[in-house]
Image (cartoon, grey):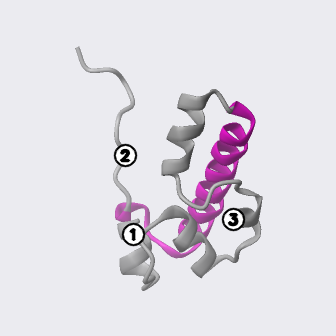
């Protein structure tokens, strides 16, 4: 969340916190978990429906923040990382 902290001067350091600070709480209200660590517990317990809802909310929040950043930040502010497996 460094780009948002430096470019948008946010005080939050979590996805849901930065999203709420810059965009609003809309997608946060859809998330069944107040903390992402609850997703681990859901996974271990086999409770998949709220886990899927949480993951979709995370994807949508990330996309909304990405679209905001694209409007106000230079591409040089972002670094790309490869998702290819090493080995």
Q: Outermost residue, left direction? A: 87
Q: Position of residue 1 (x, y in %)?
A: 41, 65
| Mark 3 and mark 1: Cα distance apart in space | 20 Å
The answer to which of marks 3 and 2 sits earlier in the sequence is 3
Residue corresponding to mark 3: 28
Marks 2,1: beta carbons within 8 A: no
Q: Quadrant of the C terminus?
A: top left
**Magenta segment range?**
48-77
Q: Could you tell whether 15 is left or right of 22 in the image?
A: left
Q: Residue at x 58, y 80 (%)?
A: 21
Nearest to the observer: residue 46 or residue 76: 46
Nearest to the observer: residue 33 or residue 71: 33
Residue corresponding to mark 1: 3
Secondary element at tag 3: helix
Q: Position of residue 11 (x, y in %)?
A: 43, 83
Q: Give the quadrant of residue 75.
A: bottom left
Marks 3,1: beta carbons within 8 A: no
Q: Residue at x 73, y 44 (%)?
A: 53
Q: Residue at x 54, y 48 (%)?
A: 38
Q: Is residue 69 magenta?
A: yes
Residue 26 lies, with reference to residue 42, above or below; the image says: below
Residue corresponding to mark 2: 80
The answer to which of marks 2 and 1 sits earlier in the sequence is 1
């Amino acid at each position: 969340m460094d780009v948002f902290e430096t470019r948008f001067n946010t005080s939050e350091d979590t996805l849901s916190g930065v999203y709420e600070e810059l965009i609003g709480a809309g997608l946060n209200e859809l998330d069944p978990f107040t903390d992402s660590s609850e997703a681990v517990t859901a996974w271990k317990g086999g409770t998949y429906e709220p886990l899927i809802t949480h993951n979709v909310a995370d994807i949508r929040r990330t996309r909304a923040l990405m679209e905001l950043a694209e409007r106000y930040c230079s591409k040089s502010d972002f670094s790309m990382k490869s998702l290819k497996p090493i080995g």
